[in-house]
Amino acid sequence: MTAQLPGKTRRKTRIGLVAGGLGTYWPQFPDLLPQLQESARYVSQRFQDMDAEVTDAGFISDAQEGAVAAEQLRKADCDLIVLFLTTYLTASMVLPIAQRSNTPILVIDLQPTEKMDHANFGTGEWLAYCGQCPVPEIGNTFRRAGIPFRSVSGWLRQESAWERIGQWIRAAHVRAALRHARHGLMGHLYPGMLDVSTDLTLLPATFGSHVEVLEFDDLRVRVEKVTDTEVSDRMRLVREIFTLDGTVDENDFAWGAKVSVGLDRLVEDFDLDSLAYYHRGLDGEQHERLGAGMILGASLLTARGIPASGEYELRTTVAQLATQVVGAGGSFCELQALNFEDDVVEMGHDGPAHLAVGSREPRRLRPRPGRLGRRLERVRCRPPLVAVAGPPRGRLPRRRRIAGDRFHPGLTTRGYGDPPCTLWRLTVTDRRGRPDTELVVTTVGPAGGHAHIHCAGEIDETTAPLLAAAIEAAAPASTRIEINLAEVEFIDSSGISTLVRHCSDDYDLALVDIPAHVLRLLEITGLTDLFAP
């Protein structure tokens, strides 16, 4: 399929990287700087191996070097800047980098190994494990300066930490695509669809994208120049990709192929990254016929990574572009039916489809009456089933799915006695469907104003919304919420932030059975007393 439908080449995502530590230490501990620089080289190489263009501003030791790095990264026009904290450093060293770039910031602190050898380490070796130390200082400074940031903690060769970093790199891919995207908008609003109307100023103001307003005449003049040979070639290509239904009219098929070639030229001439369109037309006039012939070409464009959608759905093409960039694909569709027996939401549309969404043959092309006229537009792709469970909150990273295979979301059972027990499970899988991150939350109560929440697994940016939902479900009837963290294997800043955000004057929020690694984070951030039992 790649050879048949070559994808669109876009500007590579640009990642800025700078590592640093406080230069005051170097004369006192001569072996420290070389060790930290070696860690910085390892981190730099990991980023170089990612699908991005990396600008490495090197290793900074004071505010002056930080200013030089800030200017270098400003000129690089980065989509994401990564600050690698190798040991303690002052916020003044990195604030200019964040201020001048106007770019999202990811703070990473990756210590050399899983734990420090307290029995044998001196101060110099200890300092190499102090990358977490400046995180609260930098975080508070950034918040005061109004600079959004995220952070990842871990150790240098911890693959789960690198996977979380990779999620932010994939988010940067989306930002890069949207910043430089050229969205085509052709025709007019579908009559009566009030929510479809999009503010053409808001899109470039938010993302930096450009909206190219097009007329169907821009397509018409290009379709008129398509030759019979080009039509035959396009029909041959379509037969290689689709299974044609026996009811397909050859003239309709040829017209759809001709419009498809014209669409390709339109996209190329205007350098479009996406296209949304609609034209109602009257009495079979030429523009109506063009609109009715769009589906085949729009589906082929979408398969090439240039998402297209009908009904003037600019919002949909923006979302499709985002999912396309992270490798998931996205198809123009709408809610159709709910399967309550299997907990499946069925979605589809009689418009352009994303061929990559289909998991099996056949992809069938057949004629279908549209809202106006006869269209060669029904592209049937049977998608892979994705089971969805868990609270309807939070955002998922690239190509990840929420799958619930044991517990239903919010399933309340009284088989465990009274008060009832509510079980929630969230499993985040990798691209191959293998479990990657999992959190199981069990809520007992509320009863007598007390609710008990037990967490087992990992709490990070993908699973923290599940914990938030459990707290919010218990809060209205509770004067005290006790959260047991005994089986929490990992928690990062997203989990800590979720706990802090849900502190309230309406109820006491207490943490019990806190494992050592969680307690250490609470002590570093000064939050121990806030969650005291």
Image (tube, rainbow, N blue to C red):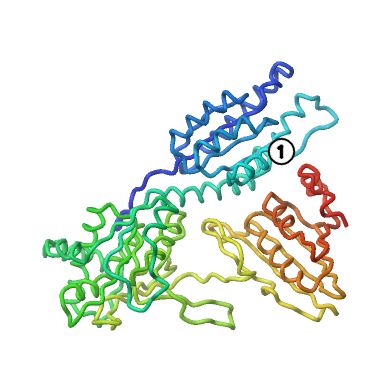
User: Is 370 drawn above or below residue 66 in the view shown?
Assistant: below
- Within 10 angstroms of label 1, few (less than 14), some, or many (20 or more) residues? many
- Residue 238 falls in image quadrant: bottom left
Q: Is residue 416 left or right of residue 281?
A: right
Q: Quadrant of the N terminus?
A: bottom left
User: In the image, what residue occupies the spot 82% across and 74% down?
Assistant: 445
Q: Is residue 146 left or right of residue 455?
A: left
User: Is 426 drawn above or below residue 120 in the view shown?
Assistant: below
User: In the image, what residue occupies the spot 55% across and 47% down?
Assistant: 166
**Could you say whether the residue bearing mark 1 is in a helix, strand or loop?**
loop
Q: Is residue 1 visible?
A: no
Q: Quadrant of the C terminus?
A: bottom right
Q: Is residue 288 visible?
A: yes
The residue indicated by pointer 1 is 132
Residue 421: x, y in percent? 79, 75
Instruction: Report the front residue among 141 and 499.
Output: 141
Residue 176: x, y in percent? 43, 47
User: Is 336 drawn above or below residue 521 in the view shown?
Assistant: below
Residue 117: x, y in percent? 80, 32
- Residue 426 falls in image quadrant: bottom right
